[in-house]
Amino acid sequence: MTTHLVVGAGPVGTALASRLSQAGRTVRVVTRSGGGPALGRVQRIALDALDSVALANAARGVGVIYNCANPGPYPTWERGWPPLAKSVLYAAESSGAVLVTLGNLYGYGPVDGPMTRDRPLAPSSAVGAVRARMWQEALDAHRAGRVRVTEARASDYIGPTVTDAHGVLPMYAAATLAGKPASVMADPDQPHTWTAVDDVVSTLIALGADDRAWGSPWIVPSNPPVTVREVLRELGARAGTGEPRLRRVPRVALRAGGLASPLVREALSVLYQFDRPFVADATETSNVLGVHPTPWADVLEVTAKAWHARVVPMS
């Protein structure tokens, strides 16, 4: 039976390792700290994924490698992602494993209309350019016959284990679910695609198992787009915290903050995602690979409960 290697134990990596283990698969999870789910079929390995030799050794005998790592906040991406991606690619090449990378939609840049997997990449930000380069290098290796690769492209995460370290929505919800006003950085009334962590996991597993997926990127199936205001309203209704109160931070204030903060500066470069409709179309993923999004009401129910419990001491 195929052994799986998961690099990273954030919300997606942890959920992926758990799902694979529950399905009877043997899983190795690599993190610096040796973290990950404490399950019978999960071997937790402490090593730095930047150490390509150590990672390649951990990948021996593995059938699929899932790159679910994150080098840190936006300002670290340009220096952190390239060596990490190269190390994971080397591990896949040396082991013969299929490489499934967890990606995002930043590489498409600002678009008019829905994003599909075959839409050309045209990043307008440094973080988007990094992700686009990573995919191109992996695809070049695939086309050269050195390795088999694929990528799952997800939008902003939603789910009970997602925290404000993983996006703006939980940050806003931390305020609104505590009955406080939330300061939002862009237009809260633009349609936006939100991707459930469980649906990311389903897509990653499908990509690793189906050779039709290899050599291409795939959009993670998600529910129809919902505005920031509406998703906060729906979370609040389920948590019993009432209508969200939102106040928009003036863009000039954000730009001033960006002069002093690299994190704010990088965040500004991707705020176009909330200034206009940001819609992902995963029809082809569903049609070809049979992955469909979790019903929106179910996603909201579990997320509202978990996020509200997290902020109860604040209220």
Image (tube, rainbow, N blue to C red):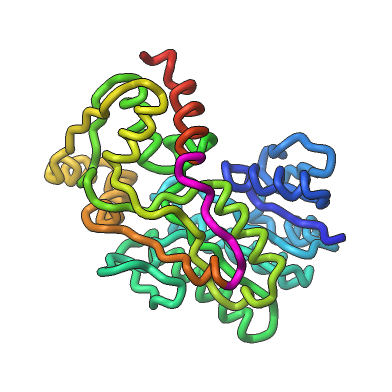
Please name the residue shown 43% across and 13% down the image. Answer: 313
Q: Quadrant of residue 35?
A: top right
Residue 200 x/y as whole percent: 56, 53
Quick one: which residue is furthest to the right in this view? 1
The C terminus - image quarter = top left
Q: Quadrant of residue 122?
A: bottom left
- In the rendered image, the vertical position of residue 42 relative to residue 307, given as above or below: below
- Say how many tags the image has: 0
Residue 1 x/y as whole percent: 87, 60
* Boundaries of the magenta span: 288-298
Does residue 95 appear to the left or right of 291 in the view shown?
Answer: right
Q: Nearer the viewer, residue 279 or 92?
A: 279
Quick one: which residue is furthest to the bottom in this view? 144
Does residue 88 appear to the left or right of 238 in the view shown?
Answer: right
Does residue 266 appear to the left or right of 49 in the view shown?
Answer: left
Residue 87 x/y as whole percent: 64, 63
Query: Is residue 139 highlighted in magenta?
Result: no
Does residue 289 appear to the left or right of 185 in the view shown?
Answer: right
Please name the residue shown 73% across and 63% down the image. Answer: 64
- In the rendered image, the vertical position of residue 88 relative to residue 263, given as above or below: below
- In the rendered image, the vertical position of residue 108 relative to residue 155, given as above or below: below
Q: Nearer the viewer, residue 99 or 119?
A: 119
- In the rendered image, the vertical position of residue 144 relative to residue 102, given as above or below: below
Residue 155 x/y as whole percent: 43, 55
Please name the residue shown 39% across and 74% down the image. Answer: 121
